[in-house]
Amino acid sequence: MTPSTGSTDPSIRIRGVEKRFVTRGGSGPRRGVEALRGVDLTIEEPGFYAIMGRSGSGKSTLLHLMAALDRPDAGEIWVSGQGVHAMDEAALVRYRRRSIGIVFQQFNLLPTLDALGNAILPGVLDGRARAEVIPRGLALLEELGVGERVHHRPEALSGGEQQRVAIARALLFEPPVLLADEPTGSLDSASSETLWGVLEDIARRRQIIALMVTHEPLAAAHCRKTFVLKDGRVVGAFDSHGLDPTSLASRASELLG
């Protein structure tokens, strides 16, 4: 399989991004919540990066905007040279399918498909022949250590194995950017440590950007740089690779105030 992503430039450039949500408390009036308040963030080199912040800081909202799962109310989002903020709906579908990879906390595997079926699903939805995408899916599953589990459905896989299948699915079109939203939130500590190493290795070997939302200092210690969000804004960043978790948590706390 020779996928086309439209760009091989691993970069993220975010300028002045704002996002508001409207909520209603019970029978009370509707009110606006500012999830993001002018976010600026730039990543121009391959590597494994983290976004940290307290609950409600806007971490997942920002990641979802980069993945084109929602639209910003203001600002610009450039991923791999593509202006996501300005795309029409047809372009957004192509972008989500071919140009970006995203991994969620809950795996989001289809229970009726085996590991291989889940891994090649983006290619099938894109209209590729199964004979074209199966070799790529098998190679990815083997690379990620689940090559012997290709015909097992999600219910027969451990949490760590399910997340590796989800990563294989995200990498099917060889995107230059991989986004991970709390990818170890449903895993035990041993599986989490293994998965952080997998993401770090993927970014290094494939020379892509892997950007992870996390609240875990242990996770961010695997990343070359950590961005810190507070109240919908990036309040700072620091080199984090190799820092012990206590020191990393202290650095993040200083920025959070």
Image (cartoon, rainbow, N blue to C red):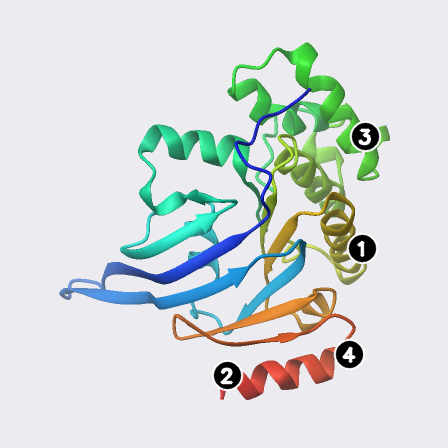
Q: Residue at x 53, y 84 (%)?
A: 255
User: Which mark identifies residue 256?
Assistant: 2
* Label pair 2/3, CB-CB below 8 angstroms: no
Mark 2 vs 4, N-terminal side: 4
Q: Nearer the viewer, mark 3 or mark 4?
A: 4
Residue 84: quadrant of the picture: top left
Give the crowd class for mark 2: few <14, some 14-19, many >=20 residues within 10 Å: some
Judged left or right of residue 243, residue 18 is left
Give the crowd class for mark 4: few <14, some 14-19, many >=20 residues within 10 Å: some
Q: Secondary structure at mark 2?
A: helix
Q: Nearer the viewer, residue 85 or 139?
A: 85
User: Which mark identifies residue 149?
Assistant: 3
Residue occupied by mark 1: 194
Give the crowd class for mark 1: few <14, some 14-19, many >=20 residues within 10 Å: few
- Marks 3 and 4, how far apart at CA: 35 Å
Residue occupied by mark 4: 244
* Label pair 4/1, CB-CB below 8 angstroms: no
Quadrant in the picture for the N terminus: top right
Where is 136 relative to 64, above or below? above
Mark 4 vs 1, N-terminal side: 1
- Marks 4 and 1, how far apart at CA: 17 Å
Q: Secondary structure at mark 1?
A: helix
Tell me the amino acid under the disc marked 4. Answer: Asp
- Marks 2 and 4, how far apart at CA: 19 Å
Residue 210 image offset from top left, x and y in percent = 64, 52
Q: Residue at x 83, y 32 (%)?
A: 142
Residue 213 image offset from top left, x and y in percent = 57, 60
- Marks 3 and 1, how far apart at CA: 18 Å
- Marks 2 and 3, how far apart at CA: 43 Å
Mark 3 vs 1, N-terminal side: 3
